[in-house]
Amino acid sequence: MKRRVVFASVALLAVLGVVVLPWVRAEAPASDDKPATIIVKMPANVALTVHGKESYRVQQMGTERELQTPPIATDKKHKYTLEWVEGTKTETKDIEVTGGDRLVVALAQTEEKEEAKSKVYDVTDKVLIPGIDKKADVVEVWYWLPADSQSQKVLDLTITKGPPDFKIVQRGPNQYLYAKLDKPNKEQLEIEAKFTIRCTSISVPLTGRKAHELTREQKQIFSPYLEKNVPNMEVNERITKMADDICGNETDPAKQVELLYNYVVDKTVGDDTAEGKSKKIMSSDEGELEELLKKRGSVDHCLKHGGGSCIDQHALFSALARARNIPTRLQFGSPLEDDANGKDPGYHCWAQYFLPGYGWVPIDVAEGNANKSNAEKRKFFLSGIEADRISFFEGRDTVLSKGDKDGPRLNLMIVGHVEVDGKALDPRTFKRTLKFDPAKE
């Protein structure tokens, strides 16, 4: 029975991004034993192994990796060794912790290289929401905010303008502002968030080792990211056959991802690329509001029109990957482009897929498509993203929270969601600006 309880904790913490070091003690832990937490700061794409009673390869990637030991004594030191590869040389670092400790370890040999891959920005994100009936009884607002993720770290955050009595809601990997206004007597709302954020370029080389299929335990842990009935991203017979035809006899999940990526890059066209504009490729962002709210980011749209928006393209990739039992999750955010600084940046969608032995790997099919004639960039976006974006929301088919109870279920949460007496406003009418500058030392 104890083993089952430990496994359930491991599964939950793994989904939350915490790696539990799965070493079984020979003796039962004392009642006052506590786990120790080890925060390891290192380059995002460098593999980490922890040596204790046994050796454990950490599958989590990213610039900060949170590890948790089994319960250990609080009155004596326990030794662990961190091992990583620096170029062609294997480096190690010995650490000591007691139960209940929270230790931050920076791998000094790699800090200088990591700085070059990261950029720190001071950001002002402002939105004006028009179209509110002054006679409305109730207005409810949800507005996205950045949270820590694989590729970014929020260093500071303040809401400088917003509705009265707003809440900051955290649900899963996401956080957002929520407010309920009774008889607000306003025709528009303004929200302004100021934050400092470190964005990091990530590149995960898919070479040197073969990925294996998910274990039974991993299928349980990552079941939300294998769901085959997500609206607009369904894995039906057509998608399953398409994925099987693309992958053929290939059994290595990493190579299957590459085959699926190349298919979507070559067979679809982004609506905002030069090719897409010349071919007048439609995106699912167009159309009536009801259609937009229900069908935005659609596999069917992408196949019917030969492409579409970045969400359409990633919906297709994700459905194909899930058909091959490869977990995926969508990311939504804003590009940081100099020519759009201080203007509405629009939105951007990319994805992550999980490979045993590699962890969560970023992918940008839309950028791969836009750069498909550039072999180097095309290869990079198969398993990497640059530090030129901010992630604001993860996932789709999402139930929003009001803090103390559930709110509406949304197909997609992009920028924000506003309801006036229970009726959604058109998010395309929101007037948003995003200003970013390199953070001052």
Image (cartoon, grey):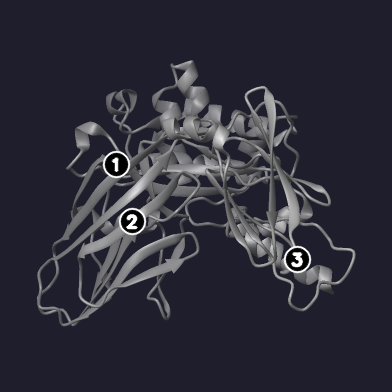
Q: What amino acid is found at the position of numbered circle 3 in the picture?
A: Ile
Q: Quadrant of residue 41?
A: top right
Quadrant that contains the N terminus? bottom right
In terms of sequence position, does the residue under pointer 3 or pointer 2 come before the other? 3
Quadrant that contains the C terminus? top left
**Where is residue 116 drawn, in percent x and y?**
43, 30
From the image, tell me which residue sits under label 1: 441
Cα separation between marks 1 and 2:
14 Å
**Where is residue 283 drawn, in percent x and y?**
33, 41
In front of the other: 72 or 58: 72
How many residues crowd around disc 2 within 10 Å: few (fewer than 14), some, or many (20 or more)?
A: few
From the image, tell me which residue sits under label 2: 156
In terms of sequence position, does the residue under pointer 1 or pointer 3 come before the other? 3
**Where is residue 76 drawn, in percent x and y?**
75, 64
Residue at 20% x, 32% y is: 339
**As drawn, is 250 to the left or to the right of 2?**
left
From the image, tell me which residue sits under label 3: 72
Is residue 37 shown above or below 235?
below
**As drawn, is 349 to the left or to the right of 102?**
left
Q: Quadrant of residue 437?
A: top left
**Where is residue 96 drawn, in percent x and y?**
70, 53
Is residue 87 shown above or below 174?
above
Asked if residue 239 can be seen in this view, the reply is no
Q: Secondary structure at mark 3?
A: loop
Label pair 1/2, CB-CB below 8 angstroms: no
Asked if residue 242 can be seen in this view, the reply is yes
